Amino acid sequence: MKTNPLLEELWRVKDDLAREAGYDIGRIFAELRAAEARQPGPLIRSADELRCYVADQEHRREATLTPALKVEPPPARPDHTADAPSHV
């Protein structure tokens, strides 16, 4: 059977955290809550929260950008050919 290195790393971290907390589930969760409180940014707990967060960040970034091109074309110049004398 093939091993999955990502799962193996996850299990190793889980085992390390459990060992550090003396295999006390209450202590494990208390330490996790303390770690969450130390995080400077938002905690994202689901894919939906991540999508909303990314959309909000993109919207904020776009609101601060200055458009490089004008949306509307410049006004048309008046046609001066009608006033010019005709050479016949």
Image (spheres, rainbow, N blue to C red):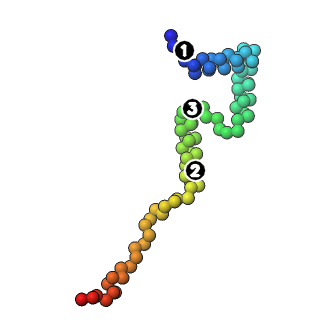
- Which comes before the other along the chain, label 1 or label 2? 1
Please indicate whether residue 53 sits to the left or right of residue 26 in the image.
Answer: left
Residue 32 x/y as whole percent: 70, 26
Q: Residues within 10 Å of mark 1 (few under 14, many from 20)?
A: few
Q: Amino acid at mark 3?
A: Ser
Q: Which residue is mark 1?
A: 3
Residue 56 is labelled as: none
The residues tagged by marks 2 and 3 sit, at their Cα atoms, a distance apart of 23 Å
Give the amino acid at mark 1.
Answer: Thr
Please tell me whether residue 72 is drawn above or below residue 78 in the rendered image.
above
Residue type indicated by callout 2: Arg
Residue 57 in the image, given as x and y percentages of width and height? 58, 45
Determine whether, in the image, residue 29 is placed left or right of residue 74.
Answer: right
- Residue 61, labelled with which disc? 2
Where residue 54 sits in the image (x, y, percent)?
56, 41
Looking at the rendered structure, the secondary structure element under dot 3 is loop
Q: Quadrant of the C terminus?
A: bottom left
Residue 25 location, quadrant: top right
Q: Residue at x 70, y 19 (%)?
A: 17
The one nearer the camera, 16 or 18, is 16
Name the residue that disc number 3 marks.
Answer: 46
- Horizontal arrangement in the rendering, residue 72 relative to residue 29 (left or right): left
> Residue shown at 54%/33% (left/top)?
47
